[in-house]
Amino acid sequence: MSFTSEQKTRDPRPADSLTKLRAEALNSFQQLGFPTTKNEDWKYTNVAPLVKEGFEPVIAKTELKGPPHFDTIARLKANRLVFIDGFFSAEYSEVIDKKENLLISHLQNAKTDFEFQADYKKDGFTALNTSFFTDGAFISIPKNCALENPVLLYFISTEGANGKVSMPRNRFVVGENSRCSIIECYQNLSNTKSASNAVTEIIVKENAGLDYFKIQSRTNNYSHIGTTAIRQEKNSRLNSWTITLGGDIVRNNLNVQLNGENCETQLYGLYVLSGNDHVDNHVTVDHAKPHCHSNQLYKGLLNGSSSGVFSGRIVVRQDAQKTNAFQSNKNILLSEQATVNSKPQLEIFADDVKCTHGATSGQLDEEAVFYMRSRGISEQHTRNILYQAFAWEVIEKISNVELKEYLSYSLMIALNR
Amino acid sequence: MLEIKNLKVEVEGKEIIKGFNLKANPGEVHAIMGPNGSGKSTLAAALTGREGYEVTNGEIIYNGKNLLELSPEERAREGVFLAFQYPVEIPGVSMANFMKASVNEVRKHHHLPPLNAVEFLKLMKEKMKMVEVDDKLMSRSVNEGFSGGEKKRNEIFQMAMLEPKLAILDETDSGLDIDALKVVSKGVNKLRNKENIFIVITHYQRLLDYIVPDFVHVLFDGKIVKSGKKGLALELEEKGYDWIKKEVETVE
């Protein structure tokens, strides 16, 4: 464990700049308030049931009654940072990769400033997080470093939160010519209602590569509002997976700025919903510079009375010539009550670009179901195989075999809830 | 032993099979020939339990069981196999995984332990060789991007894997050139034995040059109107279906 020795390298700016930021953000929040369905960006997601209890932040570490029963993801071979109700737990965390200038730590005392900010002037939840965040992961990958193991940030909610909302703030920098995988996993390990409001800010520097995962599993009684803001610099590569296996009210904002030429961006998403789950994925890819390639592939399997939302916004600025930007959202509705709203938004100001988008929602191919049954495979098994095959397109490109297996397994559990 | 008694089948409220009778013993190959719209594919669908094909009358007794009471998967486990006229593409499901699930479900039904990975691979290799299927197809998604010939050959490969007791070939010759037809027929002939029954449904006689039937039945307007030995197929080829139509009309 090496957190304390590294803490001195963080905190480059005095605390009063943070105090100022928090005050500004609080001011923003007071003007913005919580969004309502009258706001076009929140048209299909009503947060009133979530915020009516006050949406109060957890402001101090909570007491555990006993050792938490971690999910199998905690066994992943990884640099693991555990956050309990939003606060770092040194006891359950372990950093296994050691490199000079490598920092895999947390924003203790919340003093760390950052050169790139998620926009708190437009989104009430981001403003609230900016104003109240107390802890979160801080990862800095130095130049020319290929991190051997992934970083797992494991955010769990416990009974100790007592209905309050954890508000972690994560900040990652992937240095020039470096490569790493970072996994954020959010789970509710309690039997009571709980929620988190997270913000993650990421800079992927020149020639760097990042595999970024946001996984929500074990989501009974769990709501999550989160924004991930990513800035990609020249020649960088980003693969992102947003995998949501349920949740009461979930909103994943993913905002990617392509801030240099020749960036590659693959954004994958998968949501497997049942009961009254509601999951809203809001993706924005902002092409600010030429010769970048972005692709969004979001897929959903919706059962019960669940509802899904996909909003994919592609902005191609005037300078961003030779942009390729693609988007696809495919859904399978497993029941008649399940619904999905899919909304592409293309804002193109350059003339030499290739942009496409497409959205589908439908049922399983019954011809395929009969074909498989006619080979002796039971109807239930057939459907499970076909659902997995549908989801596989999102999961197959994950290079970490252990993680891929965890997700395939969790997917089956989510499907058969 | 298969016995189909006075079978009537409706599709969307319209009667297509209008009193079909057939008896077939183990070891026999029965060809069912007929013009377009005579009910050939409806018969195949009813035998395998496809949804939307409503049996309004009759029985299909196979080894003492009424097939009509069984689901499609139960029929398959009992040894019924349909080689599809239009094999379905299933993106994301590899041939190997598909066949493994299939073979092991059939084995489970017969109280046999599942094959492990090594045993399964060995079986697959053996059958691929037998029906001349390229092993590259096994790592691909089921039928996805397969050529017409590859799809039909893949049906015969699946048949070889499952070793059915009652195999139904629905227009297996359609869309095949002569070389592909020979390969497919060769595969089928290797699978023929004293235990199993083949029902070969076809519009044209040419398949029957390679898969030689014991009996030929002519299906017309949902009924068998003429039965005979293999010579009947040649006669049909020569005289065309109009000959049958005229005969039927004269009788009526």
Image: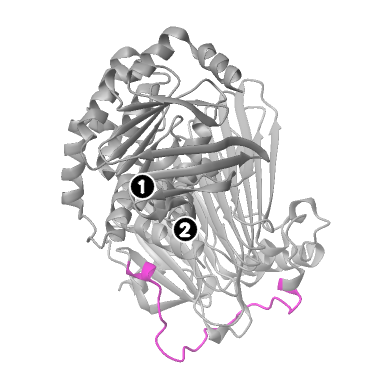
Category of crowding for the residue at label 1, using alpha-carbon neighbours closer than 10 angstroms: few (below 14), some (14–19), many (at least 20)? many
| Front one among B231 and B50 | B231
**Residue at coordinates 56% horizontally, 31% vertically from top-left?**
B222
Mark 1, residue position: A179
Q: Position of residue A395 (x, y in %)?
A: 43, 49
Could you tell me if the residues under marks 2 and 1 are in contact, i.e. CB atoms within 8 Å?
Answer: no
Res A260 seen here: no
Q: Looking at this rendering, what residue extends furthest in the right direction?
A: A38
Toward which corner of the image does residue B249 lie, by quadrant? top right
Q: Position of residue B115 (x, y in %)?
A: 21, 55
Which one is in front in this view, the residue at disc 2 or the one at disc 1?
2
Q: Which residues are magenta?
A: A50-75
**Residue at coordinates 46% horizontally, 92% vertically from top-left?**
A65
Distance from the alpha carbon under mark 2 to that under mark 1 = 41 Å
Q: Looking at this rendering, what residue extends furthest in the top direction?
A: B238
The reply, left or right, for residue B137 in relation to residue A166 is: left
> Predominant secondary structure in magenta?
loop
| Front one among A347 and B222 | B222
Q: Position of residue A370 (x, y in %)?
A: 48, 45
**Residue at coordinates 73% horizontally, 56% vertically from top-left?**
A121
Give the residue type that dot 2 points to. Gln
| Front one among B1 and A410 | B1
Mark 2, residue position: A380
| Front one among A371 and B6 | B6
Give the colouring mode of the picture.
one colour
Q: Chain of mark 2?
A: A
SS label for mark 2: helix
The earlier-in-sequence mark between 2 and 1 is 1
